[in-house]
Image (cartoon, rainbow, N blue to C red):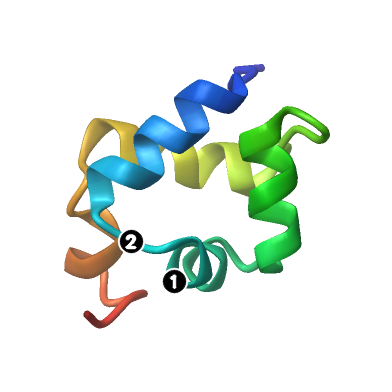
Amino acid sequence: VIVYTSSEIKFIRNSTGLTQKLFAKYMGVSVKTVEAWESGRNHPDGTACRLLYLTKKDPLFPVNSGIVNR
């Protein structure tokens, strides 16, 4: 199981160029959840970790997969 730190999550989101709002939509969570991840109050698990893994490997994944339209 991969555990992402708050700074890693913020780095991954920033590498995509997505706002917290768009990143939350992509991840299937609320903006409050993304804020909690990025502040270290909460940690992603399950599907969210898998999406973070794929996005860390390829920052264009959210757009190229068709999940997010810019």
Q: Residue at x 22, y 68 (%)?
A: 63
Question: Residue 39: where, in percent of width, then height?
Answer: 69, 34
Quarter location, residue 36 = top right
Quarter location, residue 17 = bottom left
Q: Find disc 1 in the rendering and name its residue.
A: 22
Identify whether 27 is placed above or below 36: below
Q: Residue at x 51, y 23 (%)?
A: 7
| SS state under label 2 | loop
Q: Which of 32 and 56 is in front in this view?
A: 32
Q: 19 left or right of 66?
A: right
Q: 33 left or right of 11?
A: right
Tell me the quadrant of the picture where the C terminus can be found. bottom left
Q: Which amino acid does label 1 sit on?
A: Leu
Q: Nearer the viewer, residue 58 or 7?
A: 7
Q: Nearer the viewer, residue 31 or 69?
A: 31
Q: Residue 53 carries which label?
A: none
Q: Residue at x 37, y 36 (%)?
A: 12
Tell me the quadrant of the picture where the N terminus can be found. top right
Q: Residue furthest right?
A: 41
Q: What is the crowding at mark 2: few (fewer than 14 residues within 10 Å), some, or many (at least 20)?
A: some
Q: Find disc 2 in the rendering and name its residue.
A: 18
Q: What is the crowding at mark 1: few (fewer than 14 residues within 10 Å), some, or many (at least 20)?
A: some
Q: Which amino acid does label 2 sit on?
A: Leu
Q: 16 left or right of 52?
A: left
Question: Residue 8: where, in percent of width, then height?
Answer: 47, 24
Identify whether 22 is placed above or below 61: below
Question: Residue 31: where, in percent of width, then height?
Answer: 66, 65
The answer to whether the residue labelled 2 contacts the one labelled 1, judged by CB atoms less than 8 Å apart, is: yes
Question: Residue 56: where, in percent of width, then height?
Answer: 32, 33
